[in-house]
Amino acid sequence: MKKILLGIASSIGVVGLLGAFLIFKVLPDTNVESIGYQYAVREDISNLPAIATPAGYTSLNPQSFFSGKSRVKKLAQSVVEGQTTELGKAEALIDWVQLHVRPQTSAPTTVITDDYVNIIKRGWGYCDQMAHVFATMATYVGLEAQQLQLYRNDGVSPHTLAMVKIDGKWRIASTWRGVIPKNSKGEPYTKTGFIHRLEQGDIYELAPIGPTEFENSKSLKTFPYISNWQVGMKVVNRVVKKVISPSSSSDLAARVQIPASDLDLYDRARNAHLDLSYKLAQNLYSQVIMNSSSIILKDEAQFALGMAFYDEKDYVKALETFNKIVADDKNSAWQISARRMSAESLIKMGKVKEALIILDSIGTPQSKVRANLVRNELSSH
């Protein structure tokens, strides 16, 4: 029996290694996909959407195992620096994800691969991707975390949150709203407690999502915290789909119409930014803005430049950059996010009343929840 089990384990290991090798060989040879800016529709199998839903995401891009993993782990640890409690760490990560993985539903391109490294480098995504990033980063700082996928009675999933274990209990974490909801005692809600909260009235702008969706919800474990067997099966599944439906690099490049040299420069900027080398990132973003022929890339680089100033804690320059987006380009996909970050910069500068005016004017669920949190903090002082 022992020999049989060892044989099975060896086979899984061989399959996993073979799959990892084939991923390197089968991936399209294009800067567009390899650096994480795969501007393509979700249905394009060459970009490997979350084929395992609702069993979790694959995150089997090679960078998720090597350079990307170490980068994100270092980044996560810098985000929670100085935090001594599980709640403090979780809240710091929620804040970071909500500001750095913006809900760009109006972006000029469609969300693609559900790989946590690519999502972070891209800087925007949907609720499930934000929850995925949070859960992964939380794991890297020693917390237990999962995605929480909500379901209606008809089986459709309208929203995804996260759950994180704090003080021995699983607590609700809303990455899309940027908050870990707390009860009147200041304790984070468990799922059961949050269902009771929603039954009393929605104060987190979740409607029409309500108690039913939470009662039907499922917790999802994702890479890097799933079993080796699951990883091996996902690798095999991915390779098979790639072999059956190989992608065309030329088609992908034609669809995005962004020069490879521009993408390489922007990728260098994003890498520098995520490596906390803010001055270098600012310089490279500026080069993209000045020299790129792609309006899409210039637009993203402008917002990313503001984020680099914000992360460096140069809130004056951050505010100037975000205000420039708001004033100069009404068609920018980053208009709402730039206004939100203008408010965040003002808060850091102590100009809370001005920030609240902006947050109230935006009118999105995220800005409403944020304004409510800021007001509550003001009233408690």
Image (spheres, rainbow, N blue to C red):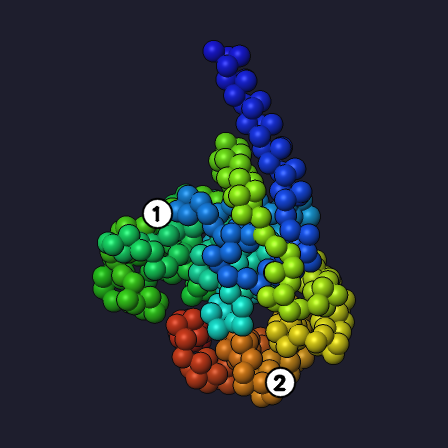
Q: Position of residue 324 (x, y in %)?
A: 62, 85
Look at mark 2 in the image and give the residue it sits on.
324
* Quadrant of image for the C terminus: bottom left
Q: Examine the image and state in which quarter residue 204 appears.
A: bottom left
Amino acid type shown at disc 2: Lys
Total numbered badges shown on the rendered structure: 2
Q: Nearer the viewer, residue 18 or 378?
A: 18
Q: Which residue is the extreme one toward the bottom?
A: 327
Tell me what residue is drawn at x 25 percent, y 54 percent.
Answer: 154
The answer, for residue 185, to whether it is visible in the render is no
Amino acid type shown at disc 1: Lys
Tell me what residue is drawn at x 75 percent, y 76 percent.
Answer: 291
Q: Check disc 2: other Cα within 10 Å, few if <14, some if 14-19, many if 20+.
A: some
| Position of 192 relative to 262 (above/below) | above
First in sequence: mark 1 or mark 2?
Answer: 1
Q: Secondary structure at mark 1?
A: strand
Tell me what residue is drawn at x 43 percent, y 84 percent.
Answer: 361
Look at mark 1 in the image and give the residue it sits on.
218
Real-space CA distance between mark 1 and mark 2, rounded to the nearest whole angstrom? 42 Å
Q: Secondary structure at mark 2?
A: helix
Q: Position of residue 61 (x, y in %)?
A: 60, 47
Q: Position of residue 332 (x, y in %)?
A: 56, 80
Q: Position of residue 184 (x, y in %)?
A: 32, 62
